[in-house]
Amino acid sequence: KAGVTQTPRYLIKTRGQQVTLSCSPISGHRSVSWYQQTPGQGLQFLFEYFSETQRNKGNFPGRFSGRQFSNSRSEMNVSTLELGDSALYLCASSLLSGVSTDTQYFGPGTRLTVL
Amino acid sequence: AQSVTQLGSHVSVSEGALVLLRCNYSSSVPPYLFWYVQYPNQGLQLLLKYTSAATLVKGINGFEAEFKKSETSFHLTKPSAHMSDAAEYFCAVSDTSGFQKLVFGTGTRLLVSP
């Protein structure tokens, strides 16, 4: 079974631009969560989508948004990029939502660099 | 709110030595705990998870962890380190608010010397 895939793997943008990252979950998984990883803040939860609905959102500004499609694929968007948005963005999929024991499987991440 | 604390941002061991990576949790309810490993330029790979079925949990690559409620700990161990174990390790607790959210520790980088 194929794992979680994320595209693109690397992105370079300039301040003020916007960016869209894509995540395809494991087949059959319906929940997709996004995390931001930076050296200073570590791994932080961005949001979770299940059945095309955002179920939970972390403490990030409104410039960070996302959506999920009927096939469970998800995209996240960051508008008006700032230097501090440079990070590794990780997507994770799980079979269900709201099940604390359900394992989240992570993709390889998208490395975003903002210049 | 649940949280985890990883003691030691870096741990150095010699090949063949015992690996011990520490994780303490803070939770008002029985926690569900996970250990993930991250190799350079890669995502997170699940090593093992505790879901209250057994206090000693065996994972992949020879790793195991023991849940100790009295010590609020979930330390990760491996009897004999291998060069390929060099990576960053994250302890995480599952949010019990009804959403798929993991709260991660700050990570421990394991260095293995020959």
Image: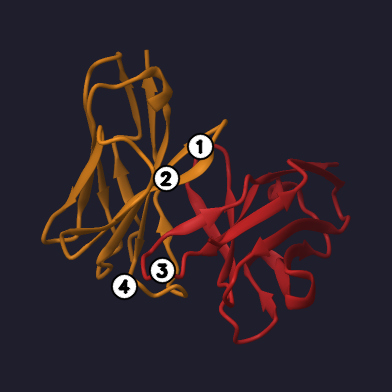
Chain colours: A orange, B red
Q: Amino acid at mark 4?
A: Leu
Q: Quadrant of residue A103?
A: bottom left
Of A2 and B54, the residue lying toward us: B54
Q: Amino acid at mark 3?
A: Ser
Using the image, tell me which numbered label, if any, was put on residue A35. Answer: none
* Residue A114 position (above or below residue A73): above
Q: Which residue is mark 3?
A: B97
Whole-number angstrom distance, CA of label 3 to CA of label 1:
31 Å
- Indicate the chain on which mark 3 is placed: B
Pointer 2 with pointer 1, Cβ within 8 A = yes
Residue for point 88% across, 55% down: B17
In this rendering, which labeled residue sits more in front, label 4 or label 2?
4
- Indicate the chain on which mark 2 is placed: A
* Residue A79 position (above or below residue B48): above
Residue for point 28% across, 68% down: A29
Q: Which residue is mark 4?
A: A96
Q: Which residue is mark 1?
A: B41
Say whether disc 3 or disc 1 marks the residue closer to the N-terminus.
1
Q: Is residue A115 left or right of residue A8?
A: right
Q: Find numbered disc 3 in the image and state the secondary structure of the residue it sits on.
A: loop
Badge 4 and badge 3 in a common chain = no
Badge 3 and badge 1 in a common chain = yes
Q: Amino acid at mark 2?
A: Pro
- Indicate the chain on which mark 1 is placed: B
